[in-house]
């Protein structure tokens, strides 16, 4: 077929154009509703739909959207497996935002493990889902904070030694703390009174030193290590 709980992010894709979006959901009413609502949001162009995980991979490889909004429970192939396959088979894979009705911590960890850049709930206002799409397209990651905090609290502290081993500088720890509160790069730059390029450099260093797959993974490590605790507000 063709066709968030965050700070402000760019409303355009990498080249300054609208973020192109593929919506994968097995429920036709939900899929149609998301398409109509998200297509009306600034800076988003819905370029296709998919009714199951197999079709999601096929359409993503064909249409090459910037972002795929991927439902979890779908026939033929679920959204987690479809995400894993898509990221493995595409030379320049799209960002994936997993979307579901169920606030399930198992889905969160599975989505991150599969390589998803974000996780949102269908019950969120459409403007927040749209913002999640924009944030992920801009190269950041998003996860609703309550799920992140519960997920970390429920897991063993298997990354507890990651920060000592990483030998982050004081400034890098500051940046990681800011990331953990959900601040975007521009907001971190404003908060620390440094340039955006400096923040991007620090974020890159943090990810490399922690061995983190993405921004969200780094934040999980920050919680697990004790650098940040649930309820941390800066």
Image (spheres, rainbow, N blue to C red):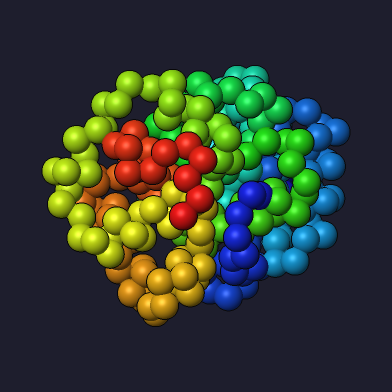
Apparent side of residue 1 relative to residue 231 in the rendered image (left or right): right
Q: Is residue 215 left or right of 44 when viewed as pictured?
A: left
Q: Quadrant of the N terminus?
A: top right
Q: How many marks are shown on the rendered structure?
A: 0
The percent coordinates of residue 27 (x first, y second) are 78, 28
Residue 191 placement (x, y as % from top left) = 46, 70
101 over 1 or under it: above or below: above
Q: Residue at x 53, y 74 (%)?
A: 15
In this rendering, does residue 82 appear at all? no
Give whichever of 45, 125 is nearer the camera.
Answer: 125
Relative height, residue 36 to residue 144 (above, below): below
Image coordinates for residue 61, horizontal then vertical, percent: 52, 46
> 126 or 30: which is nearer to us?
126
Q: Is residue 161 left or right of residue 149?
A: left
Can residue 102 be seen in this snapshot?
Answer: yes
The residue positioned 25% from the left and 33% from the top of the image is 160
For this rendering, which residue is in front, 192 or 216? 192
The quadrant where residue 188 appears: bottom left
Asked if 25 appears above or below 16 in the picture, the reply is above
> Image point 84% across, 42% down: which residue?
33
Q: Position of residue 177 (x, y in %)?
A: 39, 53
Question: Which residue is at 68% across, 43% downward?
Answer: 23
């Amino acid at each position: 077929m063709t066709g968030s709980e965050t700070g402000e992010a760019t409303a355009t894709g990498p080249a300054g154009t609208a973020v192109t979006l593929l919506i994968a959901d097995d429920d036709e009413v939900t899929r149609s509703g998301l398409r109509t609502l998200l297509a009306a949001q600034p800076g988003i162009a819905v370029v296709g739909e998919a009714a199951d995980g197999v079709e999601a991979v096929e359409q993503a490889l064909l249409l090459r959207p910037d972002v795929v909004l991927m439902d979890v429970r779908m026939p033929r192939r679920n959204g987690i497996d479809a995400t894993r396959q898509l990221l493995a088979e595409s030379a320049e894979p799209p960002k994936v935002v997993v979307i579901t009705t169920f606030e399930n911590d198992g889905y969160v960890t599975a989505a991150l493990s599969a390589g998803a850049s974000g996780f949102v709930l269908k019950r969120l206002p459409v403007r927040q889902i749209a913002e999640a799409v924009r944030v992920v397209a801009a190269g950041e990651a998003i996860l609703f904070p309550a799920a992140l905090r519960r997920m970390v609290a429920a897991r063993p502290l298997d990354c507890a030694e990651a920060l000592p081993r990483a030998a982050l500088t004081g400034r890098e720890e500051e940046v990681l703390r800011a990331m953990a509160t959900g601040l975007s790069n521009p907001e971190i730059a404003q908060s620390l009174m440094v340039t955006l390029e400096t923040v991007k450099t620090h974020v890159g260093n943090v990810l490399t030193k922690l061995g983190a797959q993405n921004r969200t993974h780094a934040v999980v490590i920050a919680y697990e290590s004790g650098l940040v605790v649930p309820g941390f507000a800066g």
